[in-house]
Each structure stands twice: as C-alpha cells, then as structure tokens.
Amino acid sequence: MTGGRNGQSRNGSRDSRQGNNQNGYGRNQNQREPIRIKPDPLKLRDITYLDYRDIRILERFLNDRGKLLPNRITAVSAKGQRTLETAVKHARHLALLPFVAEGMK
C-alpha cells in the first residue's frame, strides 16, 4: 500500500497525483488569497464627527431608494455606522434628506 492518509506514502513523500503546483497551472489549494480589507472611508477623510447638515457625505451611504447601505458594502466601522445612522435620521427629521426616494412616492 503506497498511498496513506492525506496523499502521503510510507516514506513521507507526496503522492504524484496531488502535485505541488510546480508546473504553474492552476492554483495551489493549500494557500488562500490574502483578504483585502477595504479602508474605512470616514477615516480616510479624517472625519471624526458626522454632521447631519453635511448632506453630500450622507448621500454617499444611501442607495437609490433612500435606504442606508450596510457597512459590509461601505466598509464603515461599526461605531461609524451607528453615528452615520443617527446623522441620517436627524437629517430626515429636518427634511434635509428624504425618507423615500422621489421615484418611490
């Protein structure tokens, strides 16, 4: 019996069927791609306080229907997402931002 567990033979060498990706074709299945973390857009612009009157910044985080985008898409931190949510709510109550987009009315 030459093939043992995990493609190892008795003498410790790799089974030739699995290969070490030396020919350059395909991806090595043992190595994962490094996770690319999006930078926080608020920290990039050095925004420490989200003002509810600054509509240009707030509109970047709303979709076309007027909903707040999730932080997995916008890459805002959890704390920044909470402050963004309260700023959007304040702006909506003061009628600076719409509750519903124009086409949805």
Image (tube, grey):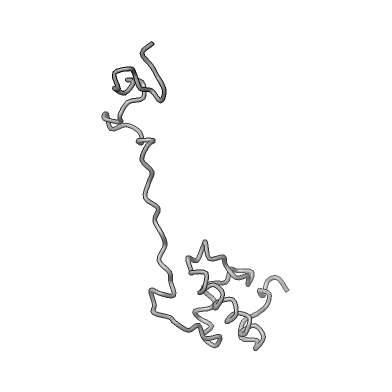
- The answer to whether residue 84 is left or right of residue 103 is left
Decide: is 16 above or below 93: above
At horizontal 36% and vertical 13% (from top left) the residue drawn is: 2
Left or right relative to 90: residue 14: left
Q: Nearer the viewer, residue 65 or 29?
A: 29
Above or below, 23 relative to 86: above
Residue at x 48%, y 84% (from the top left corner): 49
Q: Hey, which quadrant is residue 1 in on the image?
A: top left
Residue 57 screen position, x and y as percent: 49, 79
Residue sitting at the far top: 1
Q: In x, y percent, where is residue 20?
A: 30, 29
User: How many numbered dots are placed on residues in this image?
Assistant: 0
Q: Quadrant of the C terminus?
A: bottom right
Q: State the residue at coordinates (38%, 43%).
A: 32
Q: Residue at x 57, y 82 (%)?
A: 87
Residue 38 in the image: x percent, y percent? 42, 62
Depth order, front residue of 87/10: 10
Quadrant in which residue 104 is drawn: bottom right
* Percent coordinates x, y for residue 25 in the rendering: 32, 31
